[in-house]
Structure formats: C-alpha cells, structure tokens
Image (cartoon, rainbow, N blue to C red):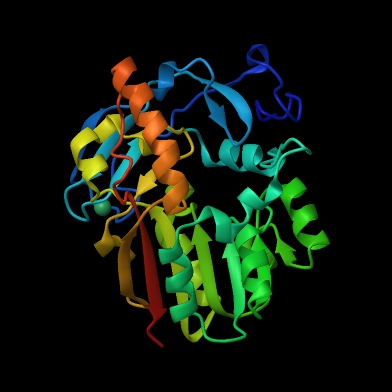
Amino acid sequence: MCIIESKQYMCKNLNQSIELDNDLFYNHCPICQSNKIKKIGELDYYSRENLTYANFYIKLKRIPELWECIDCKSWFAQNIIKESDSISLYTKGEFIKRNSNEDMSIYKFENRKPPDIKKILSENLPQKSKVLDIGCDTGDLLDFLKKNGHTTFGLEYSKASRNILQKKGHIAYSNFAEINEKFDVITAFDLIEHIYNFQLFLDNCSNLLNSNGILVFFTGNIDSKSSKKQKTKWWYFSFAEHIIFPSKQAYETNDLKVIKYNKVRLDNELKITVRSLIRKIIRLFSLSYDGWPFNSDHHIIVLKKNT
Ligand SMILES: [Zn+2]
C-alpha cells in the first residue's frame, strides 16, 4: 500500500507528517533527455519543520538538489518524490481551506494576477473560445474566462476542487484520458513546475488542440534576476512540489511554436509592492533575503500549434 494511503485526509498538525522517500534521481535531463547535466547545489527546504506538499505536512528522507541541463538550459530538481506519491497527494489534497469570514474577492483571478496577464489573454484568445485549464484548482481562471464569454473546462487531480468546479458550471476532468473534446485554447497557470513528464505533457496538450489552437502557460522564470543571482536560495525553489524549470527553447517542438514569451510579476502589481516590501524588510533583518520583490520573476508563454 502506498505510504500515503494510511494517513488521514488532512494533516492537522506536524505530528502527522507523512514520511516520503524522495528517491527519484535522473541520470538525464527530465525535459530534453540529454545526459549532459550538472549539479547546481542542495535545496534547503529539506530541513524545514513545516514542509508541505499539496496541503499535507511531509518529511523527506533525502536532501533534494537543483541541477541544470547543459543542452536545453533548463533547471530541475533531483531527489524528488515519486510521481505516484505526488498524484496521490494532489488527488486527496484540498487546496482551498479558507476562513468563511474572509473576503473571497481577493482570490478572484482578476484581482490576484497582474494586468499584463489579462492583457495577454484578451489579445490572444479568440472570442467565444473553448478553453481547457489544466491544474485549475477551484476554477479562478475559468470563472474569469466564463464571464468573458468562453466555454470552460478544467482538468484537476483534487476531487474536492472538482466538486467545486462542477457546482460553478465548469466541466471537470481528473486526467487526460477522460477528455474526448478538442479545444481552441489550453491554459496552465502555476503548473509547469509540477510536471514529471514534460514532453508527454506538451504532446497531450498538442493532441487536444484544434488546428491553430494556442497554449498559454504561466510559470517561474529561471532567466530572472532573482533566479540567476540567488540560485538554490531563490524562493521559487523552496517548494517540494516544484521540480522542473524549462528554458524557452524547451517549449519548442515539431508541433508547437513559441509566439510570446513575456516576463511578468507573480501577483497583482499594487499588492505585490506592499506585501513584498514588508517581506523584504523582514528578510533583510533576518539575513535570509531570498528574492527581488520588484523583479518580474515569472513569465507567460504563448505557444501556437503548427498544423
Ligand atoms: Zn535538457
């Protein structure tokens, strides 16, 4: 039995941490398969007391490492948890555990993401598109797209999130094999960094696109100032769930062409300024400064299907 099966649905305290043997180690680049790879350094989230995965507390047996591929210039993590354990955690995970008194409007896609992203979506999505959002959580992006006249579908491992999606009128899938539709647009926000088989993921997306369909991805930018300067200390590498960081060239395939590759900030501009300033001051005092808060350390990538 999978080690996770014996645990309760939610770990309420640190005593209930799930112990995982993070023994997945590649002898090649998991993105382009090249064997020209080298270690950058160890990732120090290993020793963190309150380490989480999805919304479970976990303990890892081995020290994870950050590596780079000489050929495709992508970065990736080594000593990661097995894909089967990862899927099990995501499936049982409940991403939204929010206080009912909280102002829920701050979680709306249009309030959370910076204007650049909404602009790119409105410029690149044809009117009344059929859109699939992969790793859609409870459908913040789908709600935004539905309001703008698009037909919305979501792919999400978490059963709890799928129930919410269905209540909100989105079609919900739990995996690629269930899908019998073709789409004009496929989006994946904050997802690429969690993918185990990147090439298979791109193939699956490409196969589900109508001709001239587009993919829109939003993920961390390893070419950003923060990433280059801080390497293993960059905040984006401090999550056990973040395992691959593809370069721009890694996205180009026979079927897909990069038509847009823009640097963007993670959050809404105003909010990131205030929040980041506070974080920056705290980190400066604690000597654990780990990011340039005003730096655009994410990017949005638009790919077009060639045929
Ligand atoms: Zn590579």
Please identify the residue farthest to the top as the structure is shown.
15
Compared across the picture, whether 178 is left or right of 121 comes to: right
Compared across the picture, whether 218 is left or right of 112 comes to: left
User: Does residue 54 appear anywhere in the picture?
Assistant: yes
Quadrant in which the C terminus appears? bottom left
Q: Is residue 36 above or below residue 10?
A: below
Q: Is residue 299 above or below residue 196?
A: below
Question: Residue 184 in the image: x percent, y percent?
Answer: 55, 82
Please identify the residue farthest to the right as the structure is shown.
167
Q: Is residue 225 above or below residue 175?
A: above
User: Does residue 137 appear anywhere in the picture?
Assistant: no
User: What residue is at 78 percent from the left and 54 percent from the top?
Assistant: 164
Q: Is residue 245 above or below residue 124?
A: above
Quadrant in which the N terminus appears? top right
Question: Residue 82 in the image: x percent, y percent?
Answer: 51, 36
Nearest to the observer: residue 72 or residue 101: 101
User: What residue is at 29 percent from the left and 56 percent from the top?
Assistant: 32
